[in-house]
Image: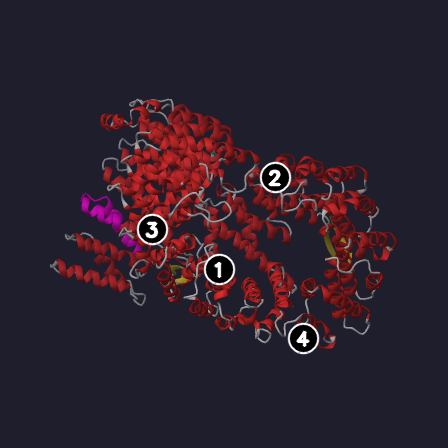
Amino acid sequence: MTSTDKDFRFMATNDLMLELQKDSIKLDEDSERKVVTMLLKLLEDKNGEVQNLAVRCLAPLVSKVKEPQVEVMVDTLCSNMTSDKEPLRDISSMGLKTVIAELPLTSTGLTLTVGVCKKITSQLIGAMGKQEDVSVQLEALDILSDMLGRLGGALVSFHSALLSSLLPQLTSSRMAVRKRSILALGHLVPCCSPALFSQLTEHLTNELAKAPPVSMARTYIQCLATVSRQGGHRVGEHLEKLIPMVLKFTDVEDDELREYCFQAFEAFIRSCPKEMSPHVSTVTKLCLKFMTFDPNYNYDDEEEEEDSMDVEEGLEEESDDEYSDDDDMSWKVRRSSIKCLESLIATRRDLLLSFFSSVCPALLARFKEREENVRADVFSAFSSLLRQTRGGDQPAGNREARGGGAGPHAAEDTVKALHRQLKEKSIRSRQGCFSLLSELSHTAPGALETHIPALIPGIVFSLTDRSSSSTMRIDALSFLHVLLLSHPPEAFQPHMQVLLPPVVSCVEDSFYKITSEALLVVLQLVRVMRPQGPSAGGGFDPKPFVGEVFSVTLERLKATDIDQEVKERAISCMGHMVCHLGDHLGAELQGVLAIFLERLKNEITRLTAVRTLTLISASPLKIDLSSILPETLSVLGSFLRKNERVLKLGSLACLTSIITHQAAHIKPAALEPVLSELPGLVDESDMHVSQVSVSLLSVMARSCPSSLSTISLSVLPCVFRLVLSPLLQGAALSSIMDLLQALVLSNTSNLGYSQLLKSLTDPFHLPSSSSSSSSSPLIHRQSYLSVSRCVAALSSSCPKETPSTVNGLLQEVKNPGSPESARVLALLCLGEVGRSGSLGASKEVQGVILEAISSTNEEVRTAASCALGSMAVGSLSDYLPFLLTEISTQPRRQYLLLNSLKEVISACAASSLSPHVESIWSLLFQHCECPEEGTRNLVAECLGKLTLVNAAQLLPRLKQQLRAGSPLARSMVVTAVKFTIVDHPAPIDALLKDCIGDFLQTLQDDDLNVRRVSLVMFNSAAHNKPSLIRGLLATVLPHLYRETQIRKDLIREVEMGPFKHTVDDGLDVRKAAFECMYTLLDSCMEGLDVLLFLDHVEEGLKDHYDIRMLTFLMLARLASLCPAAVLQRLDRLIEPLKATCTTKVKAGSVKQEFEKQEELRRSAMRAVAALLAVPEVERSPSMADFANQIRTNADMASIYQSVQGGGGGRHRARGEHGHELELGYSTTPQWLLSDAGF
């Protein structure tokens, strides 16, 4: 290193750097001193390469030497910063930045970091004071910005001194110094104390109030914008002073000053949307005024532009030349005002309707903007407005805005404003046009239908223009694809001759991305040539276009040396061509099918080939696949044993389609490879795969019954095991019922009615004593219901067998020697068979059911109750009067009989029930004040579902009962209303919307239980039909929030022997209130004052275990829905989270207490993880402290990693000693990972 040869010095320094990067290197004190001294000396080397290498050595050296040597490095570098030699200053500046970037953040290295930072800071403050040398000032400010950005928390004691040093720099005569001072202040703001932030803001306010010169005003306003962006919510409390001041400066005739004013407004809007609410109207008007501010240019009327388009192009070029001088800065004002407007659109979705009436026309008018950068921002703002209209669940007003703003009128105005620009030379303008039109197509599908003739020339121009870049052509193809997807085929058929050639040319392009996008468009154009489905018209002849499209697609299909994406899209495109135009392909078809078979055998393209064959096999053109069927079935059968689930499901769907539509060409032997794989797929571990597999068997039973001769020994046992699964329900159960019916009707040997019935019911006839043995596992309650429905399905397929089956079931119920499981199943089977009306008014059946309802066995009683309800559904006139009489005369059986009645009301059509409504209504109200809560809830459910039968008549009567009844009756009525709110559109909705406010008045009821059920009803409405309660939020929310408060008058102490136990009677009501709040986050977010909402979430974080668990979920949800508001409350939210994560259970507590506390900590840590993912959260000092606490506490770090363990990606972070660790979580922000020390 001391050699006179620069090459030797370079190689020696390089070797040193390689050694320092090794983890194994250990330096003693003397070696440390020598290495540091030599490297610092090399910073003054005459050779630039050696200097740069020496700087690079400093990075690993920081973690290898002890604190005194790091301080020596810093002292030397800082002193070099003030040197007269400019090269030495520059290289030392780089060295300091390198050292700062490597200082450790972990608790073990924090002492070193703080000490070094103090040394650097004190010297930099001194360097900043050297007004005579601007370059030193600039370097000092640059380093200070870096240090504050990374280590702001370690400089807390210097914050005040730094602020005092930086503020004078804002008045520097050099613009560069002022700008870097603003940058440094921006980095200081996130980590400084509230008092210091207020001091900074007040300083800026005072300076602006003195009416400074324009150049200084620019600096202060620019600083204010930066401080607002970095300080976030903290600027909110100062807005009332700041807004009028910034508004005043917009009147000053200075373009740059106005630009900074709008940047400040944008920062205010994004940081403090709530506090900006009173000023939104003023700022909007100002933006609309200045977005047209262009004093140096005279825009011609649109009509004149239309009339003299060609002439104007030449004039416009001259005009641009004339006004492109450097003095014209008005474009900056227009651009900043439009960006400010976009921030308003993005943050104030509640004002969407007014934006469509005021902002939308103004943006449309600015599409003629002459400055390309500004025009791009106009397009971006308009796209943001369109995006807001389709973002999530909208209130009525917003839907109205969408209809009126993004519908046909907006489409017409947009196309009129854009169609000329689609042919402009400017690529950026055309890309902006296509992006905006794509957004419009997504927002209002079909709105551009009448304007397609005006858009196609622009699309074709971008595809054929030789000066167009690859990106431009991809964007044009992408827009065309969106247009084809969102509009009817008939709109494009007249333009096929113009559209097809440029698209086909793109398919032949050498750039794979263009080819891939073009193939997607060709696929859609094939659908346009011959649409399929009920609305398909036959007036268009595709023949002239088939040859051109086929040849170019076939060329790509045959190619093997092309990109994977192109291969897949070529397969899909050709598949659609065969499906839609197969009858036009003639002899070429068999060759194409052979290629598909090859692609099916290829591991890379097999999934796409499977989906394509599914499509082709179901084609209305009845494509003949016989040439490839045997081999295809064999290959598809082999796919069923693969682990790839998507491939498995795709193969099952393909097999189902082939067997359904190509059965005539299939021999039974060809299906053996498929049947041999099915037993492994029919299993409860994957219900969806099981369902699709069983559906395939049903199709086989109907289309190829001869192939099923062997399934009784292979697949069928698996199906019967699945019937007994407690997980079986819905579509999977329906598929099994369908299979059983298909098997009975197929007349296959060994698969007759009696054999299938025996296989279904045999497991229920095993002796109960063996129920615990491995051969007969305990049967779940769901299994009874599944088997009973399967028995009923079999019975409905063989009506001749029904009487004997019913008789056998009755004997089973009567036989006291039958196992309980067999009697329960027999009762449920009777009910399901009776549901179809097969039993009639049999006195014997009624007697058996009544006897079973009186049984001493609870399972038998419950089954009899369900059976009676099901029978009544099938034969209402025979069973309903009998059921109502029994309810009136048998008080001991009342609950079970009401359960039967509930089944009747739920399952019967309204027309059938209408004659019986009055008798049922009066009977139910006789039991509305029953002392048993379970019975009252059943009565309420029956009343609610009965109200749906004739809502216009019964809902007002239900409302009257609110005034007349006791607290028990009122709670029953409110619960009944809950059951009238269903999750699908119903005739009662309009009536409910008018009167639900009356029912919600019970939130103010004196009775605690009435308020609780009222909250439950409100929660149901918010979840299933949010439109019912959106308009009432302003009146309901105060009562809802009041119920979240802990009331001491409802807390009492109960003596339990020697112990005292605290009982909180208000806990259930609070839980119901917080559950409502959680639901409102998903359904009515736009109607909430988020900061007020957060106040109550904060209280919930300190409440009971159940409520805390719920509020942790809410906090995580809020962090993603409205991060800006969460940041405003962050300091207050951190404390309860920290308390939960650090609390330990007392020694000697029961096991459940430890488990509950552990689950609380995990839930709290999930909320912390969600908060850490919020952008700019690292600016909060309290969050930074908590994050550091998590890093340094092994227990909390372990919990944090475990809750993040589900992430798909992996991060690598350098540990405390430089070891590289792989962290198995992906949502953690990088700032928490850096120097994590895990």
Left or right, 529 with reference to 835 = left
Assess disc 1: are there few (<14), some (14-19) or many (≥20) residues with their C-alpha within 10 Å of its C-alpha: few
Q: Are marks 1 and 2 in contact (CB under 8 Å)?
A: no
Assess disc 4: are there few (<14), some (14-19) or many (≥20) residues with their C-alpha within 10 Å of its C-alpha: some
Left or right, 757 with reference to 378 = right
Q: Are marks 3 and 1 in contact (CB under 8 Å)?
A: no
Mark in the foreground, 3 or 1? 3
Q: Which residue is denoted by mark 2 in the rendering?
A: 1027
Q: Earlier in the sequence, mark 3 or mark 1?
A: 3
Query: What x and y, as percent, mark residue 1206?
Result: 48, 59
Q: Amino acid at mark 1?
A: Gly
In this rendering, the answer to whether 791 lies above or below 191 is below
Q: Which residue is denoted by mark 1 in the rendering?
A: 1206
Query: What x and y, as percent, mark residue 36?
Result: 25, 58
Q: CA distance from mark 4 to mark 1?
A: 37 Å
Q: Earlier in the sequence, mark 3 or mark 2?
A: 3
Magenta range: 69-94
Q: CA distance from mark 3 to mark 4?
A: 62 Å
> Is residue 79 part of the magenta span, yes or no?
yes
Q: Which residue is denoted by mark 4 in the rendering?
A: 776
Q: CA distance from mark 3 to mark 1?
A: 46 Å
> Is residue 880 part of the magenta span, yes or no?
no
